Image: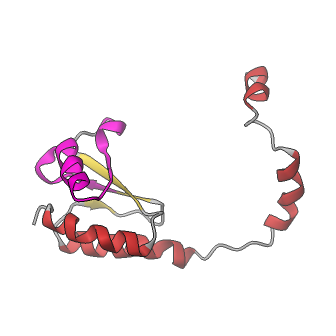
Amino acid sequence: MLPLQMGMGWGFPDALMQYAAPALETVSIDVAELGRPRDLMVGALGEAGYALTVPECTFYLWGAAPGGDAVAFVAALAERGVFVLPGTVFDSPDHFRISLTATSATLERALPALRELGPG
């Protein structure tokens, strides 16, 4: 395993990271800000009738696909310019995953399509 890690370069910090590490100790993360996209989407999709797994704070939101077919649901969203990941990637063909790393404006633009195709 050691030769493989060395060959791939991911197992050990590189010199740049070693120099940057002390400066990173002073960086703080605004957890409340990270939670805003989650709160926006959980609130809006919950009101639209989606069954969601509500994370404490994450970059993704997991939900049950309306109609139970994530591939069909994702395709219908894609036709409307909204791109989410089908749960088939995770052996869960009746779920989908939304990335919350998009801008708030992008998430807001996705909401009409999600409401239109939603369960409720």
Report the quarter where the C terminus lies: bottom left
Residue 4 image point, x, y percent = 73, 22
Residue depicted at 57% across the width and 74% down the height: 31
Residue 12 image point, x, y percent = 80, 38
The answer to if 5 sits in the magenta stretch is no
Report the quarter where the N terminus lies: top right
Residue depicted at 79% across the width and 28% down the height: 6
The answer to if 88 sits in the magenta stretch is yes
Position of 51 relative to 73 (above/below) = below
Please state if 39 lies on the left or on the right of 13 as rendered: left
Residue depicted at 29% across the width and 58% down the height: 82
Position of 43 relative to 97 (above/below) = below
Magenta segment range?
Answer: 62-91
Please state if 48 lies on the left or on the right of 22 as rendered: left
Residue 61 image point, x, y percent = 37, 59
* Along the line of sight, the residue nearer the viewer: 95 or 107: 107
* Along the line of sight, the residue nearer the viewer: 64 or 18: 18
* Along the line of sight, the residue nearer the viewer: 46 or 107: 107
